[in-house]
Amino acid sequence: FPLLAEPASGAWALGGVTPFEQAIVSSDLARQVDTVVVTGRPTLSRPIHALLARPDVRVVVADPCAPWVDISGNATTVVADLQAPEGPVPGRLADWSMSVQALSAGAGARIDQLLARESGRTMIDLARAVASATSGPLVLGASNPVRAFDLGVASLSGRLVYSNRGQAGIDGTVATAVGVALGLGAVAHPDEASAPGSPRGGKAAEPARAPRVTAVMGDLTLCHDASSLALAAATGAQLDIVLADDSGGGIFATLEHGRATTPEAYDRWFGVAQNVNYEALATAYGVGFARATHPRELAAILAAPAAGPRLIHAPVERAAHLYAALRGAAC
């Protein structure tokens, strides 16, 4: 059966996830769905919520705890655990699963075409650059970054992905990334570099204990927890913080907040772009700094060896229209 999963669900680390879930559940093929088995807490996208709320869909929740998670209040069956089927999958279900895989592949090709028509400097392009240039754990900001990965990245297989959720999901994101690095043992050795975030020196430098952690967050999220850069520097976290700067609260441009107001009112109340010298901020807290003017440049920076924490400023365009277009890539 097709496995659809959010980036931070934990399912990607095990592989077998069908990508472009939002495009799939927004397609005509999704109308054939009559049963959904839910594990975890799928709260990221409205298309998934809409699927779970359909009155013609049987929702089976697998949750060992009470009260169980029932996002749309539509669960008909609750079980503590799932068991693998004893017999072969019926042919019609296998055929349907293959149709979903083909739909996903087509959505990926369509997304490639849509992005090729744009500037190449959107949050989606940045997400793809990060996914292709890194192989270690990811920490994704709770606003547009995690949604960009969900919408536009074809595979995160084998990756540990973390993202804070909840009404105040952007709180403490830098500290979360530092904690992930420390928890996984991604800490620079004292002789790995002469300066924070600098390229590793000669052969005498020992390798890191674990792969570098890459965090991707917007400018408001970074500014909200800028003081945790001091924690990154003090601990020597092997951490790249990619600052996807879309000039404020870009996520609101994809929601009703942005569509129901004038550009001036949006910038004043929702955009709230920050006038910050990020290089000076990084220097003040003792972390390395780099600037990427294009996702291709960002990929090159991330692929190069480095030690210690580093802040990478990567301006991107909001391109709010792309989010709806990518959701419709399988239609």
Image (tube, rainbow, N blue to C red):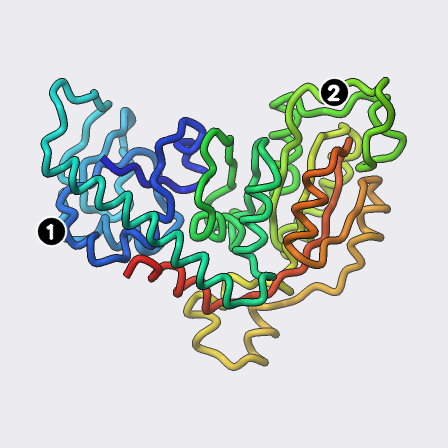
Of residues 236 and 93, the one nearer the viewer is: 93
Mark 1 neighbour density, 10 Å: few (under 14) some (14–19) many (20 or more)? few
Three-letter code, disc 1 = Asp
Q: CA distance from mark 1 to mark 2?
A: 55 Å
Residue 120 in sight here: yes
User: Which residue is denoted by mark 1 in the rendering?
Assistant: 56
User: Which secondary structure lies at badge 1?
Assistant: loop
Element at badge 2? loop
Q: Position of residue 318 (x, y in %)?
A: 56, 65
* Rendered location of residue 220, percent (x, y): 63, 56
Vertical relation: 219 (above or below) 164: below
Q: Position of residue 41 (x, y in %)?
A: 35, 39
- The circle on residue 207 is 2
Residue at point 40%, 42% (across, down)? 6
Please tell me whether mark 1 or mark 2 is closer to you in this view: 2
Q: Name above or below for residue 245 compared with residue 150.
A: below
In the figure, residue 203 lies in which quadrant? top right
Relative placement, left or right, of 312 versus 179 is: right
- Viewport quadrant of the N terminus: top left
Vertical placement of residue 51 versus 133, above or below: below
State the image quarter where residue 194 is shown: top right
